[in-house]
Image: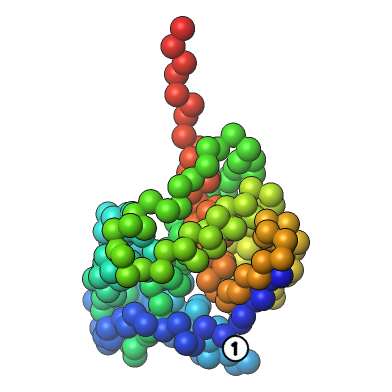
């Protein structure tokens, strides 16, 4: 059984500093807090976070790559995420979000930057990814559920790569995103052990789908190793 939970407000744990937009910055534009009529507070927060992630990737790619090596939710991951929470990428106000949502936003941005025009849709030859790497580095991190969720996402992407790609390329909090979730749910269900129950927010699952899709696509795009006679 899959229980999709929409609200994300309770997940806000990493705060971004606030800064005034002086118009003198060079590089990507800082994120604006959206104020769309009819959009829920949670969706506005999600959209702002994804815009923020785009700015962070453009400004500090090397630091972003180092952050993604850390295990999700670990002390090291939170510390590095906090260091990436900087004034330059938020034009005004204050934004809070969880490390998990931030990580998912970064993978979403990386996928669009590298694979938006052309992305692999067959991952049958891609070796299994070890999503548990680094999990023992922090004994206080609840690694089990994070690994399980990523394995579920990996299975879903392999079974339904087109629907996964559609989801990651959809606008956050849009009708297109809702439609993409509806299409991908059957593939999720077939990846869950019978009798098990998995609970997650749409935001979190979009994030891990983005992570699995990006990592599988990156591995699929690597040239095959030469075979010696």
Residue 17 location in percent, x, y?
27, 83
Q: Is residue 12 above or below residue 128?
A: below
Examine the rendered structure and indicate whether residue 93 appears above or below residue 101: below
Residue 161: horizontal and vertical position, in percent?
Answer: 65, 50
Q: Is residue 9 left or right of residue 174?
A: left
Q: Nearer the viewer, residue 97 or 194?
A: 194
Q: Percent position (x, y) of residue 47?
A: 50, 78
Q: Residue at x 53, y 71 (%)?
A: 204
Q: Which residue is mark 1?
A: 39
User: Which image quadrant is residue 203 in?
Assistant: bottom right
- Image point 55% across, 38% down: which residue? 126
**Viewport quadrant of the N terminus:** bottom right
Left or right position of 5 against 59: right
User: Judging from the image, what secondary structure is the residue with disc 1 in?
Assistant: loop
Observer-nearest residue: 139 or 64? 139
Q: How is the image coloured?
A: rainbow
Which residue of the protein is positioned furthest toward the front in this rendering? Answer: 195
Whether residue 33 is visible to the viewer of this picture, yes or no, is yes
Res 51 visible: no
Local packing at callout 1 (Cα closer than 10 Å; few below 14, some 14-19, many 20+) is few
Residue at the limit of the structure toward the top, as seen here:
229
Quarter of the figure with residue 70: bottom left
User: Residue at 50% across / 79% down in the picture?
Assistant: 46
């Amino acid at each position: 059984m899959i229980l999709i939970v929409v609200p994300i407000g309770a997940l806000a744990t990493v705060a971004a500093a606030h800064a005034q937009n002086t118009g003198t910055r060079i590089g990507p534009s800082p994120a604006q807090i959206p104020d769309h009529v009819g959009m829920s507070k949670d969706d506005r927060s999600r959209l702002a976070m994804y815009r923020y992630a785009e700015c962070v990737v453009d400004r500090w790619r090397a630091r972003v790559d180092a952050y993604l090596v850390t295990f999700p939710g670990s002390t090291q991951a939170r510390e590095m995420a906090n260091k990436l929470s900087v004034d330059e990428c938020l034009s005004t106000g204050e934004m809070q979000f969880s490390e998990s949502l931030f990580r998912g936003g970064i993978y979403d941005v990386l996928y669009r930057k590298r694979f938006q025009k052309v992305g692999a849709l067959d991952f049958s030859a891609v070796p299994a990814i070890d999503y548990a790497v680094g999990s023992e580095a922090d004994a206080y991190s609840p690694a089990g559920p994070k690994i399980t969720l990523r394995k579920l996402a990996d299975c879903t992407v392999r079974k339904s790569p087109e629907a996964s790609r559609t989801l990651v390329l959809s606008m956050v909090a849009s009708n297109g995103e809702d439609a993409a979730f509806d299409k991908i749910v059957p593939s999720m269900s077939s990846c869950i052990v019978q009798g098990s129950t998995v609970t997650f927010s749409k935001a979190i699952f979009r994030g891990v789908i983005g992570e699995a899709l990006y990592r599988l696509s990156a591995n699929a795009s690597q040239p095959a190793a030469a075979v010696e006679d």
